[in-house]
Amino acid sequence: MAGLHDDINAVLTRYFTLWNDWKMDDLRRLWDADEKEPIYVAEERDPLIGWPALLDYWKVSEPRRSEHFIAFGDLHVREIAPGVAHAFYQLSWNFFVIGNRMYQKPIGGEVRATTLLRKKPDGWKFFHHIESPLASLIQLKRAHEQNVDERLFTMLEEKGLYSRSKP
């Protein structure tokens, strides 16, 4: 299924490039306009069900007051029915809110994402997208692991208590 994987990878690459460039009209065209009730569950808000909710969400930052960088990786794709693909991947979101007093520095995070796409005559189209944030316990654990002083690793390795090659 390398062809399917490549096709979905290309659609997702295009989709997140459009998000990063804030080309929302083009981004909307990657959704199946024939879908009566698309579903979009963004990490930061309640589920959006139906076109009015999605269209409102996509214009929420007009005029644009932030800069975004979204990237995806570790893509797993499978066909779950003829002409219907399931994509599961890791999503990294990063943004900077211009002139925001609370967030004066860029912030970011990771989510797991599932997207369902339908094969249409003009290519694969989204009709269902869900972002699932990591549990706060996992986020906190990773933050603590990333902030360890290198000298502790050296000390533990010298005592034979820990090896970086085998956590």
Image (cartoon, rainbow, N blue to C red):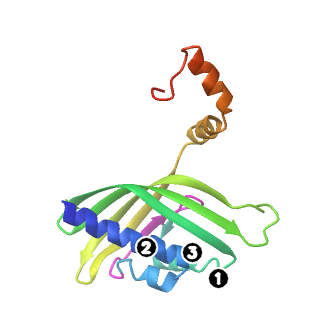
Give the alpha-carbon distance from disc 3 to disc 1, as whole Å.
10 Å
Q: Main secondary structure of the magenta part?
A: loop
Q: Horizontal and vertical percent for residue 70?
A: 52, 65
Q: Is residue 158 above or below residue 111?
A: above
Please name whichever residue, 135 or 12, is drawn nearer the observer in this view of the structure: 12
Q: Is residue 158 left or right of residue 132?
A: right
Q: Can see residue 45?
A: no
Q: Is residue 64 above or below residue 157?
A: below
Q: Which mark is residue 15?
A: 2
- The disc labelled 1 sits on which kind of residue? Glu
Q: Which mark is residue 57?
A: 3
Q: Which mark is residue 137?
A: none
Numbered disc 1: secondary structure? loop
Q: Is residue 158 magenta?
A: no
Q: Is residue 103 above or below residue 68?
A: above
Q: Which residues are magenta?
A: 33-47
- The disc labelled 3 sits on which kind of residue? Tyr
Give the mark nearer the N terminus: 3 vs 2.
2
- Can you tell which of label 3 and label 1 is closer to the viewer? 1
Q: Is residue 86 above or below residue 25?
A: above
Picture residue at 58% right of the left edge, 39% below the top? 142
Q: Horizontal and vertical percent for residue 66?
A: 67, 73
